[in-house]
Image (cartoon, grey):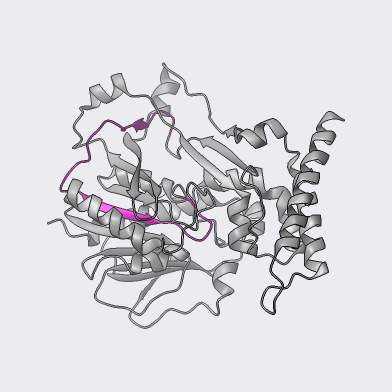
Amino acid sequence: MRQLSYTLQIFSLLAVITIISALSAPINSKSQMTRRSWYQKVWGFGCLASSLSINPVSAFAGQARTSSQVPSPSSGPDADMARADPQVLYKSLSIRLEDFGVDVPIACWLPVAGSALSMSENNNSMGGVMYSHRISVKRIGQLLAGWDFIPDFVSRNFEFLPSMTPGSLLDGRDVPFPTSSKVVFLAHGYLGSRFDLSHLAEELAQQGFVCISPEYPESLAASYPRVDGLDRSVINDKMLQFVKENLKPKSYAGIGHSLGCGTVLRMGDSSWTRVLIAGRAPEASSSSLLFISSTNDGAVRFGGPLTIPEGYEVLQESNLPLSNLPSTSALIFDRPDAPNHISYLSENVNEAMISFLSPLLPVAQAMSIPVLDFDRYQQSRDSIQTAKILKPLIASFLSQKMPSN
């Protein structure tokens, strides 16, 4: 009964906010709120409040936290198995954009080899780390439905383990960036996060790459406000300046998912190596490019038929080569259980979305709000299976195509 009372309080608050939003909205030919849309919002938030069973203390404080941490053994044969992966350093930092008054979070993965600390120093002074992630319903409502009235407190913070075995990802906050490295930028999609491709970053860092993943304004984490004029290109320009000054890379690559495909295509020049996942295949050019898509991707099909321009070498999933990969390659998953739009993301990111957003799915579907294949992934849960194919393929492609000098 007490929880029900809290839920009704939250619903009442949300209903008041919705009514105020409706009454204050300008009435003109372009933005007229109909009675039906007003009822949809009230009803939708009623479903939101009841389905989330929000505790007002944790909701208003923004402290609700979910952890997928699995205890790891400290000694014995099980501990040896738990530390089977090569170790990787993780740094969380931010870049300041003075003109916009925001700090943009950036996740970084570094190889242990070549770092300023030895393996023994790493083992003695650094513990394993977890990723701090956030899902904001306010940002989701802004980007998918154009709603600006959802309160900031309707969100949840998560901490989850990396995809690597426990203890393999180490805290590298005080470790300087290595120089003369191969640098890979990761660009998340619409309503994605800087951890979407963390499983790929971990794999690549084990093989000597430095991976950098910024949070863009379209992220569901909503770590900073959306500001007019602040877009991906502004963030990338600042980030590239930082990387050139501090890392002095040998070569560059970009991996983009969904909206991130266009992001990495606009970064750099023809010397860059690129991997595009769940987007649209561009015309073949002199740049090295690996394109990955699926016939089961509902978000891609929404934009029209899946087509591959001339000049691509189409790879077969049943017989994927990991050596002598063509410079312009395409892998199209074509089977009944092929990956959907978010199958390519880290399992832990997807599980966080499922744990928090599943109750909202019926609301979104009732209001005809696009869900970016979230409903498909609830059934397939195939991140790990998809990663087993993608990680070795992408790592091999970058190793072969990124210049060494």
Q: Main secondary structure of the magenta part?
A: loop
Indicate whether residue 181 is drawn in magenta: yes
Q: Is residue 30 visible?
A: yes
- The spot of residue 351 in percent (x, y) is 59, 44
Indicate whether residue 151 is drawn in magenta: no
> With 121 as the anchor, is 32 left or right in this view?
right
Extreme bottom residue here?
310
Q: Name the residue rendered at 23%, 55% in the picture.
A: 241
In depth, the one of 192 and 96 nearer the eye is: 96
Extreme left residue here?
405
- The spot of residue 278 in percent (x, y) is 48, 65
Determine whether 93 is above or below 222 in the image.
Answer: above
Q: Is residue 86 visible?
A: no
- The spot of residue 144 in percent (x, y) is 62, 63
Tell me the quadrant of the picture where the C terminus can be found.
Answer: bottom left
Which quarter of the picture shows residue 390?
bottom left
In depth, the one of 328 and 11 nearer the eye is: 11
Extreme right residue here?
1
Determine whether 105 is above or below 68 in the image.
Answer: below
**In this picture, which residue range is highlighted in magenta?**
165-193
